[in-house]
Image: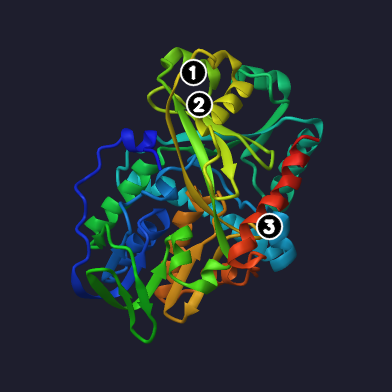
Amino acid sequence: MPPSWYEASVTRPASAPALAGSVEADVCVVGGGIAGCSAALHLAERGYRVVLLEAGRVGSGASGRSGAQLLPGYACGQDRLATELGRTDARRLWDFTLAGLDLLRERVARHAIDCDLVAGQMHCAIRPRQDAELGAWQRELAEDYGYGSTRLVGRDELAGLLATKRYSSGLLDTNGGHCHPLKYVLGLAGAAAAAGVQIHEGSPVTAIRRGAIVTLETAAGAVRARHAALCANVGNTRLDQSLARKIMGVLTWIVATEPLGAARAAALITNNMAVTDINWVLDYFRRSADHRLLFGGRVSYSGMDPAGTARATRARMLTVFPQLADVAIEYTWGGEVDITMSRAPHFGRLDPNLYFLHGFSGHGMVLTGMAGRLVAEAIAGQAERFDVYARLRHRDFPGGPALRRPALVLAMLWYRLRDLL
């Protein structure tokens, strides 16, 4: 994948050494994204000996290259959770994501993580039926979930916040926000290392030997642990076939403009909030700390890079902000995000001492950190909160290895057509 603006705007520490030889641990965590670093940090703070194995570099997966919008809730929506688990547990899952927002802010403050954290996030409507959807959503959040941080923004007020005519209304959440995701995950990894976590980069797991002691093998070593947590998200598919059938990686894309200058960037989004529309194939965007526009939303369900990604994403950006026609795109990047059939997160156990986290379905910035905390609690013997998620039912993607992607592409065509109605 091409380098991201996030990578270009950080100075990484020296690489952690690859695993060499056999080591013993209380817990082995696989995956150096937010979920893995969060789990490792919480476990180390509880006194566990933790080894973290990362196939590439810390934050090189979805955690370090995402759109980085900080928002509560789930990609599947609360109605689906309430239908499956009942309203009481659906409310608990909602509250867990609010706790995830608080956890992120607390970690930033406690560990002095400089990640360009900004408050404010808005979902925007394009069509009249979407105006009604935002209104119904705001009422549901207030009446059913006691969430009072959102308010509806009409067209006139919206014109003072966004320099575009594309949107007819918005739902502004002052509790949401955005940040620099790679700076955040690197800060978490630094905090985990300071707490005693042994981190190994360039150490993809090649085999898992299950039992009372879990052995995770790499090309040059092995970790023997009493517990293990697979937090590699789409990377979990190469570790266990039963997990591979439940998730699929889809490619998403983001572009970063050249620096616009402080005044021109501020004029686009006057309150510096993060923005996303509510189409199925959605656009999302925000300002960066160095006064660029970061704009994403391109999705490839086929698993291949669409031709002309930079041109296509830039064209979508100009649909929102035609005044940027003279602006160059300096960075284009993408990568896989893991989705489940239902778009609900998939957490659970393969064995009593072998846990997994994946299926965040594009809502990972907040939920991954909380998921890491919950799996750490479960390993420590306090599994009540983790087990609410483990009760969610997940279907295999249909079609088997050969046909599952074509089947998904056909299904997504219907949703794309719906966006146009």
Do labels 1 and 2 touch, CB within 8 Å?
A: yes
Question: Is label 2 in a helix, a strand or a loop?
Answer: loop
Please state if 39 lies on the left or on the right of 308 as rendered: left
* Vertical position of residue 311 compared to residue 398: above or below: above
The answer to whether the residues at label 3 and label 1 have Cβ atoms under 8 Å apart is: no
**Considering only vertical position in the picture, is 72 above or below 18?**
above
Q: Residue at x 30, y 43 (%)?
A: 112
Specify the label residue 272 is tagged with. Answer: 2
Q: Mark 3 and mark 2 in contact (Cβ < 8 Å)?
A: no
Could you tell which of marks 2 and 3 lies nearer the N-terminus?
2
- Looking at the picture, how far across and down is residue 69, in whole percent? 51, 40
Chain-order first, disc 1 or disc 2: 1
Type of amino acid under label 1: Ala
Q: CA distance from mark 3 to mark 1?
A: 43 Å
Q: Residue at x 60, y 27 (%)?
A: 316
Label 1 secondary element: helix
Badge 3 amino acid:
Ala
Q: Is residue 147 visible to the viewer in this orientation of the structure?
A: yes
Task: Give whichever of 347, 119 is nearer the camera.
Answer: 347
Residue located beneath label 3 in the image: 407
| 218 lies left or right of 283 | left
| Side (left or right) of 216 relative to 303 | left
- The residue shown at (57%, 53%) is 361
Q: Is residue 1 above or below residue 215?
A: above
Name the foreground residue: 31 vs 289: 31
